[in-house]
Image (tube, rainbow, N blue to C red):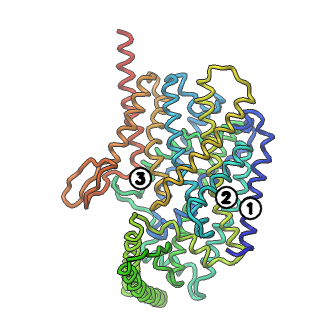
Amino acid sequence: MHWIDWLVLIAFLGYTIWDGTRHGKESDNIEGFFLANRSMPWWAMGLSVMATQASAITFIGTTGQAYVEDMRFVQIYLAVPFAMIILCTTLVPFFNKLQNFSAYEVLEERFGLSTRLFTSLLFLFSRGLGLGIIIAAPSYVLALLLNIPLSTTILIIGITATLYTMVGGIHGVIRTDVKQMAIMLFALAFCFFWIHYQLPENVEFSDSLYLAGTLGKLDALDLSFDISEKYNVWTGVIASLFLMLSYFGTDQSQVQRYLTAKSLDDARKSLLLTAYAKIPMQFFILLLGVMLYVFYIFGAPPMSFRSVEPTAQQQQIEMKGEQLQKQYDRAYQQRKESARELLQNRTDKNARQFQQADQQLNEVRQAELQRQEKITQSSLNDTNYILPYFILNEVPIGIIGLIVAGIFAAALSSIDSELNALATISIVDWYKRLDSKDRDEAWYLKSSRFATVLWGTLATLAALALGETRSIIELVNKIGSYFYGSILGVFVLLLWVKRANGVGALTGLISGMGTVFLFDRIYTNPGNGDWETIMPWQHVPEGFTKSIEYLWLNPVGTTVVVVVGIIFSMFWNRFKRE
């Protein structure tokens, strides 16, 4: 980057640390540290929730996903408005009435301490691991900018977020999230504008949409019902509803935000802001990825957005790369000419030629990615490098720093809220609840800051262990789907099954987690109809794919917890009477 961009980026990071830490004086007890003394306005909470959602994963992963595939990923957010309405009439009033610190405190009164601790433990494990991915995401950009190892950039991100969260508490988290959201929106808007501005003069916005639609890049809805498909309408409306209900209703990182509200109405308004804005925002980010694809129809794209250099004694692989580059250049020119011909004369014949040229280009690109996998001896692709490549090579000096600052803002706004939530559960549900000594507020405040640092360290180590992934946006949702459905099931028992007891809830929770794991390991061979249960340490035979995609694990987990919880509660109640 240019030195001007460095100044912009450093200024942003410096301001964020100052802005987050200056609220430390308002967090002089654990209620201030964790709940901002229940004084936050609804718009700040709502923007903070949206900022957490619009993480660096959203910037990097979602745009790359749309570039490589299409816009069907937006379907998993179709359930967000329905989930928000349900939560505003159920769990939000429930939590507001009890005035608790933690979402899981309420479980102890009905189901006992064991259920509360086990549920909160699942949250700690799932979000701790997920936080590692959120830290790793912007590290791709930093590694590309600074030309230093990924591990170094992970350490920079993890330490920065941990520092101001430890000092400022939830008050600093929400206040900085609001400002970070503004920078994120600017970065998104400018990227979209700049892509359109850089297109050839005779290519209008409508032309861009036409080309994208011809290639199927604008496909956003799939009405077919198939639980082995990741993205379709039924997945978004049914399976994703369970994910969103659990995430916004039982995940401490989200619940903690509306626990800081001044009133019940404010808590509801903060969630409804997300209900109105989430789908349009996600659609716009996916459209940005599609527009990026159109941009590289006319501006020469690299064969791979992530370059890998062959090591010694790999001359054959290197020669293959040179051959692929020549094929790629020819395919690119052919696709570019086909696109211009199609825009001049929009016939079915020209459309088919354009589609064939695009297919040929992507076949060469896939061959290059396979070549890189042989070099690295790992299963990687360049999905997470597409947007960073565009920023570095196409955006003007000065604006690069602002956009990179926007990606930083997205990362920090997700990390800080997760750290504060993890610290809350560690102190409130575990340390303070199990501590037999009578300690003062100052002691627990120090412990809360220590817990924040501890989780920041663990999350950073998790990011180092995870390294690079195929699609970070998918991976973070997959991790959540292992836990969210089962946790939601416990709250369903709490609110709507009056006869449910602690034995049934805990047994159901354990059964739900086990069932989710087993269902996730079922593979089928579409060719002959065979199916197998394949453990993570076993090799997946050729031709076998997962029978159930990860989003459907959420309703599976919820259903098993509720059914098993009801059955065991009935048997236990009958056993006690006898």
Query: Would residue 56 be visible to someone looking at this image?
Result: no
Quarter of the image with the N terminus in it: bottom right
| Residue found at the very far left of the displayed protein | 528
Q: Nearer the viewer, mark 3 or mark 2?
A: 2
User: What residue sits right under mark 1 in the picture?
Assistant: 12
Quarter in which the C terminus is drawn: top left
SS state under label 2: helix
Q: Which amino acid does label 2 sit on?
A: Ala
For the residue marked with disc 3, what is the amino acid?
Answer: Thr
Determine which residue is flagged by label 3: 235
Query: In the picture, residue 268 is in which quadrant?
Result: top right
Of mark 1 and mark 2, the one earlier in the sequence is 1
**Residue 422 location in percent, x, y?**
60, 40
Q: What element carries label 3?
A: helix
Q: Which of marks 3 and 2 is nearer the N terminus?
A: 3
Q: Residue at x 60, y 88 (%)?
A: 201
- Residue at the disc numbered 2: 409
Front in this rendered view, residue 249 or 144 = 144
Q: Which of marks 3 and 1 is nearer the N terminus?
A: 1
